Image: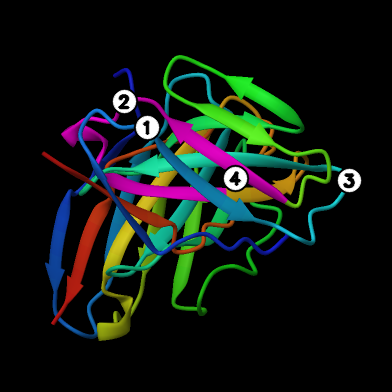
Amino acid sequence: LAKTTQPISMDSYEGQEVNITCSHNNIATNDYITWYQQFPSQGPRFIIQGYKTKVTNEVASLFIPADRKSSTLSLPRVSLSDTAVDYCLVGDKRANNLFFGTGTRLTVIP
Amino acid sequence: GAGVSQSPSNKVTEKGKDVELRCDPISGHTALYWYRQSLGQGLEFLIYFQGNSAPDKSGLPSDRFSAERTGGSVSTLTIQRTQQEDSAVYLCASSLRQGAYQETQYFGPGTRLLVL
């Protein structure tokens, strides 16, 4: 499993776009990049997954450069309810478990 | 129910006692996973089931930990002779099929275990 590095914490004002970058220098050819979000006192929930270039869904966008050694999760116009820990995971689609690091603690300020 | 459910939501026990944690996965999900999260930490993978079978038990912290799944549905995680370092939130997740990165994992709310 590739090791990931992401900021320990980030603060953002309500209504702003938040970009969280994750480094994964040892990503392998078969690895996918997946982001999960964990709200206080809840289990994590899937946000988005990608392999290369850009992926967008109803809650976020994921930007992956050509070398795939990093990825950026973009959350548009965050609200107070987006205060959570966001985890970047990298692994082979055939893997049988997810490896969570300590994540990025996002705090949205009014 | 629509999501993964876990019981009990909270458990306080005395050191040395046995505890049993239960997970009800989403109906139809064949894969089930157990994780542990200590205060302020990331998640630690414990074990996964494909159907009733657990191919790899190496993630279990010690031989005091065991898990089983019956009928391809409900799973129980048992901790024998609990220790204070076992205090954590135990999270269960399920996915439609095996393959953690290919399949979205749906997590339950967790069981908060406190060993006194």
Q: Residues within 10 Å of mark 4 (few under 14, many from 20)?
A: many
| Residue positioned most to the top | A58
> Can residue B71 be seen in this snapshot?
no
Q: Label 3 vs label 1: CA separation?
A: 30 Å
Where in the figure is residue B15, as x and y percent of width and height?
A: 20, 85
Residue A52 % position (x, y): 77, 32
Badge 3 element: loop
Tell which subunit mark 3 falls on: A
Q: Is residue A46 magenta?
A: no
The residue under label 2 is A77
User: What is the magenta range?
Assistant: A70-88
Mark 4, chain letter?
Answer: B
Q: Answer left or right for B97 relative to A15.
A: right
* Amino acid, disc 1: Glu
Mark 1 chain: A
Q: Which is more N-terminal, label 2 or label 1?
A: 1
